[in-house]
Image (spheres, grey):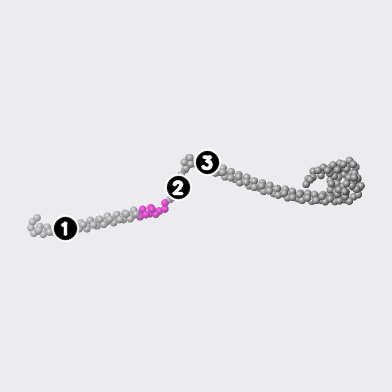
Amino acid sequence: MSGPGATAAAPARMNARRARRRGRPRALWVIIVLLASSGVIRVSETAGQAFAVSGAPTAPAPAAICEPPPDSAALLTALRSRETALAKREEALASRAQTITLAQTQLELKLAELIAAEDRLAATLAIADGATESDVTRLVTLYENMKPKEAAALFSEMAPEFAAGFLSRMRPDAAAQVLAGLDPKAAYAISVLIAGRNANAPVQ
């Protein structure tokens, strides 16, 4: 198309093209911004879900049951059996020690009672011996003060051993007078007994 009208339309078309070229970059930037915004929103949602999942309480995992191997189980059973046996043995030893201690205490009490009884018996014997000695001394003094004839008649009724015991404790002169009044056989027997007692006596 030629002429003035065609000349005027050409610049108008050029200006329209320039305007469209200038508007394209703006539209691209708008699209980029929208896409970036959408990405940020999606990232935010994903992070929120992740935080929500991580913050939620989780159920504890069941404890794993660890079973010992067969050899360890047998060894553990043997150790427990040995421990039980040792505990019973220790209990038996403690009971035995307690029984021994009780028996020892009772034995000590019995021994103390026996010692006390022996002391009482010794005291009683000492008193009896003292009384007997006192009685014998008194009889010896009585026989010494008797008339020889009366004393001889009394000694003739005694057993020779008994008469010899009294005569050996009397004064020699009184004993001689009593022996002189006795029967010769009785006097001889008593003299032999007194000599035998003196023979056993120490010289020094």
Ranked by sequence position, the earlier of labels 1 and 3 is: 1
Label 1 sits on a secondary structure element that is helix
**Furthest-front residue in view?**
204
Front of the two marks 1 and 3 = 3
Q: Where is residue 136 in the image (x, y as percent from the top left)?
A: 84, 49
Amino acid type, callout 1:
Arg
Amino acid type, callout 2:
Ala
State the separation of the CA atoms marked 1 and 2. 75 Å
For the N terminus, which image quadrant?
bottom left
Q: Where is residue 24 in the image (x, y as percent from the top left)?
A: 20, 56
Front of the two marks 2 and 3 = 3
Q: Does the magenta stretch include residue 56?
A: yes
Q: Do the residues bearing badges 1 and 3 touch, measured as CB atoms within 8 Å?
A: no
Q: Nearer the viewer, residue 150 or 4?
A: 150
Residue 78: give its label: 3
Q: Which of 34 and 102 is in front in this view?
A: 102
**Furthest-right residue in view?**
149
Amino acid type, callout 3:
Ala
Say few, some or many: other residues with alpha carbon within 10 Å of mark 3 (under 14 / 14 to 19 / 20 or more).
few
Q: Does the magenta stretch include residue 121?
A: no
Span highlighted in magenta in the image: 48-58
Q: Quadrant of residue 90?
A: top right
Please name the residue shown 25% across and 55% down the image. Answer: 32
Label 2 sits on a secondary structure element that is loop
Q: Does the image show residue 194?
A: yes
Q: In which quarter of the image is residue 30?
A: bottom left
Q: Which of 199 and 163 is in front in this view?
A: 199
Residue 63: give its label: 2
State the separation of the CA atoms marked 2 and 3. 27 Å
Q: Does the image show residue 162?
A: no
**Residue at the spot of label 1:** 18
